[in-house]
Image (spheres, rainbow, N blue to C red):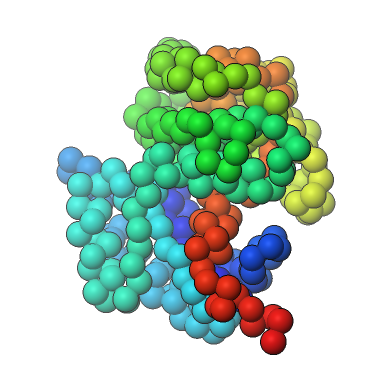
């Protein structure tokens, strides 16, 4: 069965087309994405601007044409932090639904954490025991821990790399006092969650997902994406701390010259690194393994779990 996932994120809006059926891993067939940076279109008391809403609707219309061309049979559409934070987010999505017939579901932060955890669990399997999963997005940080497919605890904090960059940094590179202030803020927010997460026990395996973590791991020496999804990639806190200090003195343009760092993400990578360093320190995680599956794959897997077998058996006919 060919499934589509429309992911309306704070930085990027992404249509991912996958071939999937129950009992097998979903295989990516086509990807179409654009950096709309919706979080930067939150104005006038956290309203999504008309320009942002128009750009989103245009992307959805284009994505639906692509989905039809690629033979998508079922579509899952969801929005995360930027639309969730917008006071007019529901109105914008209602208008898009009226114009395009695409029903975009707004996920809570807890839903994001649980679905990402599901994807990580399916990727690594049961033999990895208790997992601790950390995911840094543009608008929020998600943390989840558990032994099963449903985590014991799922936490979402407003510590996304894009959000923190906009709220705390006024220059490029940021002033030293701004970096220290943002660092204190992130650590205080994360520290409040440590007891709730660790009371269930220490993880057997600590995992990170998201573009931010992938770029940080690449800077620290992990294999490039061209080597494929099955290469083990890790991020050591010792390496992260070293690079965080270096990046604090770099401009965004200079960070974009580092291995694996895109121009579009370079401006917010320092904030992401500070959050990653805080999480690894406060949860006492010397190393994180990077998982190639995250929220989009979690949505696909959950969709497959609830679809009747009759809709998934085309390949067997």
- Left or right: where 147 falls relative to 87: right
Query: Front-most of 305 and 235?
Result: 305
Is residue 269 in view?
A: no
Of the 4 image quadrants, the one containing the N terminus is bottom right
Furthest residue in direction front, as rendered: 309
Count of residue discs: 0
Question: Where does residue 66 sit, x and y in percent of width and height?
Answer: 51, 78
Furthest residue in direction bottom, as rendered: 317
Q: Is residue 77 above or below residue 210?
A: below
Q: Is residue 152 above or below residue 293?
A: above
Query: Front-most of 96 and 108?
Result: 108
- Left or right: where 95 falls relative to 187: left
Residue at horizontal 65 percent and vertical 30 percent from the top: 130
Res 279 quadrant in image = top right
Question: Where does residue 174 sit, x and y in percent of width and height?
Answer: 46, 23
Of the 4 image quadrants, the one containing the C terminus is bottom right
Question: Where does residue 141 sit, x and y in percent of width and height?
Answer: 46, 33
Question: Where does residue 272 sit, x and y in percent of width and height?
Answer: 53, 31
Is residue 93 in view?
A: yes
Query: Front-most of 316 and 19?
Result: 316
- Left or right: where 108 falls relative to 232: left
Residue at horizontal 45 percent and vertical 65 percent from the top: 76
Residue at horizontal 42 percent and vertical 63 percent from the top: 77
- Left or right: where 30 falls relative to 267: right
Residue at horizontal 35 percent and vertical 62 percent from the top: 104
Q: Is residue 174 above or below residue 7?
A: above
């Amino acid at each position: 069965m060919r499934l589509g996932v429309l992911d309306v994120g704070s930085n990027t809006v992404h249509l991912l087309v996958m071939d999937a059926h129950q009992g097998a891993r979903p295989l990516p067939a086509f990807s179409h994405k654009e950096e709309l940076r919706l979080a930067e279109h939150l104005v006038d008391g956290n309203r999504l601007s008309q320009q942002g809403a128009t750009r989103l609707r245009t992307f959805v219309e284009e994505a639906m044409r692509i989905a039809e061309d690629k033979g998508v049979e079922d579509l899952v559409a969801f929005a995360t932090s930027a639309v969730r934070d917008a006071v007019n987010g529901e109105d914008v999505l209602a208008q898009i639904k009226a114009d395009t017939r695409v029903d975009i579901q707004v996920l809570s932060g807890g839903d994001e954490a649980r679905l990402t955890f599901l994807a990580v669990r399916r990727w690594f399997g049961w033999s990895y025991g208790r997992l601790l999963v950390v995911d840094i997005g543009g608008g929020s940080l998600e943390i989840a821990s558990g032994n099963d497919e449903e985590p014991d605890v799922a936490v979402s904090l407003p510590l996304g790399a894009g959000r923190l960059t906009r709220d705390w940094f006024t220059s490029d590179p940021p002033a030293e006092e701004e970096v220290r202030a943002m660092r204190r803020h992130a650590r205080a927010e994360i520290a409040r969650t440590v007891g709730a997460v660790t009371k269930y026990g220490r993880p057997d395996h600590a995992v990170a997902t998201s573009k931010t973590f992938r770029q940080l791991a690449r800077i620290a020496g992990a294999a490039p994406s061209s080597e494929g999804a099955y290469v083990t990639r890790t991020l050591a806190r010792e390496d992260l701390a070293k690079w965080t200090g270096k990046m604090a003195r770099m401009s965004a343009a200079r960070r974009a010259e580092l291995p694996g760092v895109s121009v579009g993400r370079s401006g917010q990578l320092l904030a992401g690194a500070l959050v990653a360093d805080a999480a690894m320190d406060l949860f006492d995680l010397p190393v994180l393994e990077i998982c190639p599956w995250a929220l989009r794959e979690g949505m696909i897997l959950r969709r497959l779990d609830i679809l009747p077998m009759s809709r998934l058996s085309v390949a067997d006919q």
